[in-house]
Amino acid sequence: MKPTFLVFAILLVSAFALPLSAGPETPAQAFADGERLLAGADFDGALAAFARAARADRENQQYLQHYAMVRRILLLREQLDTEQDDARWEYQARALHSFYISRGLYREALALDRKMHQRLSTASTAVLLAETELALDMNSEAARTLAGLPAEKQTEATRALHGLALARQGKVDEAKQIAAGVELNGEAGPAMLYRVARLTAAVGDNERSLALLTRCFESVAPSQLAAFKDHAQRNPEFGKLASKPEFSRVLQTESKVPESKCSGGSGCSGCPMRGNCGKGGGG
């Protein structure tokens, strides 16, 4: 066989071995690319991908909404670097925090929460930071965050999370003392009930934990109930309870909170634009 023909044959076989060209990007592919980039906290890349999807299919409101959402996130991130007023800065930071948590961007939330707590140093910012640290299994860091609060700034929420962080480190006796001292009044909201339910489960007080989890589910808005239940099923504190029939019964609990139709949309609670659209109503 002549060398020239041999080279041609090799090139021909190689060409057929290569995958066929994918062709032009479809709107759905651009949108999927945007979701992937957003999951990796590449906000600029996600914005460009959502823009391609929206331009290619102008009738699809989901594409446009995601573009507007990420654009708003980028603006908020820029504003945080220049905002001097603490109240406005905190509002913007909390909006970003909600978005990061709703998207599972815990590392982004961690960096933001550290800045927030360093700047404002309140019980509320300590709770935000500690909850993010616990979500990342940074239990000793969460304990230090909460132990570092002056006594006058401590609240039932900070104490409950401190006990949870200690229990996760095997300091169960200390955690039990904290759990015994945490007081819940009739006005306690679902987030607080959920924190104490986790703490009491962590120290082995299963009966109280399940009772508090039931109260939590009853007091949470219907549109948020599924997210609470999903979190409970994946939460390590409830791991030992998950196989018990009592836990299964608690998961059947329905919300007792009335809710308007506008608040039933997906993702509204974590959207930083919730106060600026016709659907969110500022709620």
Image (tube, helix red, strand yellow):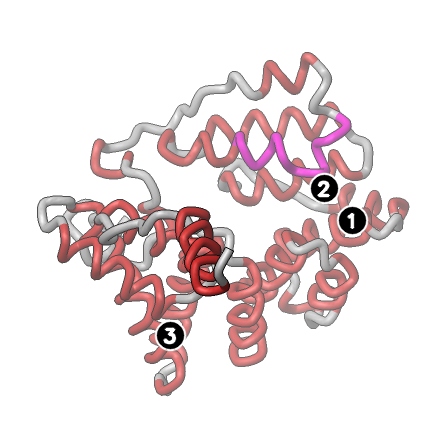
Tag 2 and tag 1, C-beta contact below 8 Å: yes
Residue 98 visible? The answer is no
Amino acid under label 2? Leu
Residue lying farthest to the front in this orientation: 1
Circles 1, 3 touching at the beta carbon (< 8 Å): no
**Observer-nearest of 116 and 242:** 242
At a point 81% along the width and 53% down the height, the residue shown is 166
Q: From the image, tell me which residue sits under label 1.
A: 178
Count neighbours of disc 3 (C-alpha within 10 A) and say few if under 14, some if 14 to 19, many if 20 or more. some
Q: Is residue 204 above or below residue 41?
A: above
Mark 3 or mark 2, which has the lower sequence index?
3
Label 1, label 3: how far apart the Cα atoms are: 37 Å
**Disc with the residue nearer the chain's start (2 vs 1):** 1
- Three-letter code, disc 1: Ile
Is residue 110 found left or right of 6 in the rendered image?
right
Q: Is 69 contained in the magenta span?
A: no
Q: Position of residue 106 (x, y in %)?
A: 55, 58
Disc assigned to residue 77: 3
